[in-house]
Amino acid sequence: MKTHKILAIILAIPLVTFAQQNDPQPTDLYELSLEQLLNLPITTATKTEGKSDASPAVIEIITAEQIKARGYQHLAHILNDIANNHEDRANWGIGEPTNQNVGFGFRFDTGQNMLVLFNGQRLNAFLPGNRFGGEEYLLNNIERVEIIRGPGSALYGTGAFTCVVNIITKRFSQNSKDEVIVSANYIPTSKGVTVNNAATVGIGKQGTLSTAFRYFKEQGQTLSVKNSLFGNADINDGVNHAIDGEVFISNGSFNLFSKISNQSRKTVTGFNGVNPSNMDELTLNMYAYAIGTDKTIKLSNKSKIKLLAGWHQDNWTEVALIPQFKLTPDGSGLLVDDAGYAILDTLELTRHGSEVSTSFFMDGQGADTRSLDAEVQFISNYRGSNNLVVGVYVADDKILHAERLSELNLDPLMFTPFRRIDDAKNNWLFDPGASRKTLAGFAQADYTIFEKLNVAAGLRLDTYSGTGILVAQRYSELNPRASFVYTVNESNTIKLLYGTATRIPNGFETLSSVSILGNPNNRPERMRTFQLQWIGNLSDNLRVEIGAFRSTLSNRLETNASITDALRAQGFIGQFINTSAEKDQMNNGVDGKVITRINNSTFALNFTQYFGSNDGYGNPIAYQPNTMINGDYNLRYKRININTGFNYRARFAKSLSDTRDVVSNYFVGRLNIIYEPQNSPIGLQATLRNMFNTKYTYPSSSLDFTDHFPARGIEVSIGFTYRPDIENL
């Protein structure tokens, strides 16, 4: 690589500009048909390259061009715009509001129902099952995001439950030019700033060096939260800092990549209570570091071996306020007032060197976890375009260190000044040295019965074991999949799919000694799904997709807090609303998509309608929208690109035991405008999210909230992009 290219990359890193996404190489997309644009080569569905329309899965592909045009800021924004999926910024578990994923009408206490891959390798963490909300997944230097809508455990094992998301880094090609982009956004509605830079350059004859960096900080918006135990509060949901980066190096058949994320957020709610936003100790901190590599060895013209290995280290630490309540004289219950509410007690604590009287003490929890995994794949193109994939996967997930940041000492029981506590007696985990081990084998093959009909089948067996308290968790999970893909003609395809999925209990659900969460006896959740899809490329400028599904969820994890008043007095106030593991949940749905293009404008609309929802007791599954519509319109006029979109959510259901109002129907719009002057390295961008300032709220998992948790109001982001011409430097 030339010296001037290296200098350009180094000099670009500290510059400040204003946009989020990398700009792809110039391509006149409007000269291509919609079929050419949307029937793209993918690898996630089968671990071999094939076209999306012919793959044995329901596929969504979000390209770099779409990410830039729509102003997506993080992964949750992408997922919220696809069919059969819904992301809301709600406090569904312990912690500050996060983007929670609802797939196929099933809502989960955290986001672990989707598997996130980075260039084909797992990113999901051992302890929470998945990282928080998708905000840490960079979008400013990727080629595309491939999403499997449906179970993927037959190929990927645990966590590939309702969808598999593969983030694929941009690569240098013969038709590419070296590029460096530096950008930043100012967000006046939350007093935030984002600084980005990205670079993609060629190295050697067939190599790529791709890098990306983001720094983000914001004061946050002020949200009014009502809570009967903690009292009402106006809080800021800000981010103290978020530092994210990635490096991708490719040389022929060898790839090496790394991701880092380090974030600190205000704990606006914690342990299902309201926290004031003026206490610096009340934070949610996380970091994640990952390194992955893969090497493809060609055995012959029709067979190859692919070797993959990864190392991941994650940390999750939260500090929140915990209420102290008065007990009855015999200690068996809570003292309540005339309205039936618990009465707060008064504590004398030493805080910041001074004696204070308060009803709330600070308590936190956190742990470092490490994951090692490796995979060997044998791929054979055994007949025509038919492929056989056979593989072995091993993983070791381990807790390295656990701690509590707290004013409460457990052994001996006493209050102390706020400090970091990491001895075994004061830990919040049943076993801070436990680990989980995975050994899996999988195989998948497709076979063309006749010219228009392709049949595929796959099977994966995962055997789980562990050390420490998880040594008793020895069990195996078998996940099959099968598909029929019938190509009616060059423009019409019909898919019939069947698959199962497994989600094994994560560290919170097996190791946490907090009463509302952990249970070492928890066993995997399982999902069985049938899908039908028709894809019609009716013309070069009109594409239609229609689908349907039936999905059943069994062995639902029980995280309901059946706790005594004495425990409630110690702050264990969560009342998770869930369904017994003895009952299967089921849901049906239809979905569709229409994409049309006229001249330099494109309109896309997708919808999902759930029906026959059953929580196992004959009631609708709670806290999900049964009607979802997403729209997007893009207009390119000379050097200006205007994109507008919306999300409509309706027909929410709720738990019969929840006396709060059901979530109201709502409509949220967005607008993104990009101006790129000709022959200028500077571009301008303005983005509005929730541009009509729609007021909508989501429920906490705790019934102790007297009101739903409010979502953000309008968000405004403005900025510019600087792209130096490094070829002429």
Image: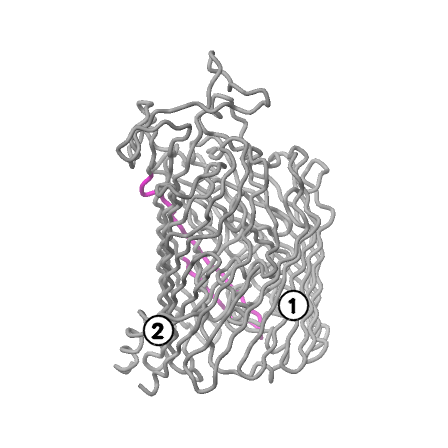
Q: CA distance from mark 1 to mark 2?
A: 38 Å
Q: Is residue 426 left or right of residue 625?
A: left
Position of residue 394 relative to residue 379, above or below, is: above
The N terminus lies in quadrant: bottom left
Residue sitting at x 47%, y 86% = 678
Position of residue 304 relative to residue 429, above or below, is: below
Q: Amino acid at mark 2?
A: Leu
Q: Which residues are magenta?
A: 375-402
Q: Is residue 321 left or right of residue 409?
A: right
In terms of sequence position, does the residue under pointer 1 or pointer 2 come before the other? Answer: 2
Identify the coloring: one colour
Q: Is residue 619 left or right of residue 221?
A: right
Q: Amino acid at mark 1?
A: Asn
Residue sitting at x 70%, y 70% = 544
Which residue, given by chain and number where applicable, does mark 2 sit on?
209
> Given this view, does label 1 or label 2 mark the residue nearer the observer?
2
Residue at the top extreme of this rendering: 330
The C terminus lies in quadrant: bottom left
Which residue, given by chain and number where applicable, does mark 1 sit on?
454
